[in-house]
Image (spheres, grey):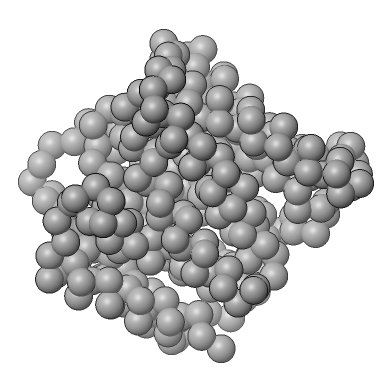
């Protein structure tokens, strides 16, 4: 079962782009994220109580988990969803965030003394080129500057969060860690609401289905798998999986949203897959 975790992570994480785009059509981004992570917080703590795990541990561990939540659920998701909201195409957002494995590999060596082998860099190059082909960005377009800025904030946050989580792995049980992370994300997004938006949520069918997907399959599923993979393996190899997210999202958009999938997209998907295989294989 554990061997299937990377595949499950890629599928679930990629699907979040589709349901996230639907959600921001029916709600302001920070209000939707605060709503989502409020429910996720309750869910993880109920699960922790059911498993009889100690929730209120050392204050240091609690603050560390909350910090990770601010990075992942506040700055990363908040940056991406705000960019969607102001009109930055999902493909552009995905391209910028796809730089994360490159930054993580550059930093994990000196920080965690991980040996980044030459084949991993070869895999990274294949993965990035493949993602770029699938996204097919037209750089001649004008995009909202504030949306582009929040994309780079999201990039910095997910890179820092991945490296930070590797340091913290094992301090508290996974469900407790995820619960405090969700709590941190919820509070941070509530603070963002006060300064940056007039909150609203339209409880339409699209919002309810999209939010259910985000809570159950992404927060409880994909994010938990990501935390496990970071704890169990190399942070540089785990981050390389993100190169498969844009191509997989493109295929899902083709299947479920009717978006076009060109021959170039298929070639890009193949290159990205080869890159991830080269970088992560034993």
The one nearer the camera, 121 or 251, is: 251
- Relative image position of residue 147 (x, y in whole percent): 30, 33
**Residue at the (74%, 58%) spot, across then down:** 169
On the picture, is 261 further left or further right than 2?
Answer: left
Q: Determine whether 6 is above or below 149 in the image.
A: below
Q: Determine whether 7 is above or below 50 in the image.
A: below
The one nearer the camera, 27 or 119, is: 27
Residue 45's quadrant in the figure? top right
Count all numbered tags in the image, as a single digit.
Answer: 0
Q: Could you tell me if residue 52 is visible in this image? A: yes
**Residue at the (22%, 56%) spot, across then down:** 254
The residue furthest left is: 140
Q: Assign the N terminus to one quadrant of the image.
A: bottom right
**Residue at the (68%, 40%) spot, across then down:** 181
The one nearer the camera, 250 or 100, is: 250
The one nearer the camera, 197 or 248, is: 248
- Relative image position of residue 63 (x, y in whole percent): 77, 37
On the picture, is 82 further left or further right than 229?
Answer: left
Residue 170's quadrant in the figure? bottom right
Q: Could you tell me if residue 146 is visible in this image? A: no
**Residue at the (57%, 19%) spot, across then down:** 191
Q: Assign the C terminus to one quadrant of the image.
A: bottom right
- Relative image position of residue 7 (x, y in whole percent): 49, 69
Q: Determine whether 193 is above or below 205 in the image.
A: above
- Relative image position of residue 162 (x, y in whole percent): 58, 56
């Amino acid at each position: 079962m554990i061997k299937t975790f990377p595949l499950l992570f890629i599928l679930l994480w990629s699907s979040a782009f589709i349901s996230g785009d639907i959600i921001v059509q029916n709600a302001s981004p920070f209000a939707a994220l605060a709503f989502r992570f409020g429910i996720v917080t309750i869910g993880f703590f109920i699960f922790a109580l059911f498993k009889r795990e100690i929730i209120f541990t050392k204050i240091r561990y609690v603050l560390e988990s909350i910090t990770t939540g601010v990075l992942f659920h506040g700055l990363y998701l908040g940056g991406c969803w705000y960019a969607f909201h102001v009109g930055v195409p999902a493909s552009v957002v995905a391209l910028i965030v796809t730089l994360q494995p490159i930054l993580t590999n550059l930093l994990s060596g000196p920080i965690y003394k991980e040996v980044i082998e030459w084949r991993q860099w070869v895999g990274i190059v294949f993965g990035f080129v493949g993602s770029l082909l699938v996204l097919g960005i037209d750089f001649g377009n004008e995009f909202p500057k504030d949306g582009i800025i929040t994309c780079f904030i999201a990039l910095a946050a997910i890179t820092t969060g991945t490296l930070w989580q590797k340091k913290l792995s094992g301090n508290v049980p996974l469900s407790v860690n995820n619960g405090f992370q969700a709590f941190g994300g919820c509070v941070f997004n509530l603070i963002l609401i006060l300064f940056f938006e007039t909150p609203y949520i339209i409880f339409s069918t699209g919002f309810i289905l999209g939010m259910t997907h985000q809570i159950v399959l992404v927060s409880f599923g994909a994010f938990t798998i990501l935390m496990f993979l970071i704890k169990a393996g190399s942070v540089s190899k785990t981050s390389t999986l993100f190169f498969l997210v844009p191509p997989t999202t493109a295929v899902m958009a083709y299947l479920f949203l009717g978006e076009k999938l060109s021959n170039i997209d298929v070639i890009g998907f193949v290159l990205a897959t080869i890159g991830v295989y080269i970088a992560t294989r034993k």
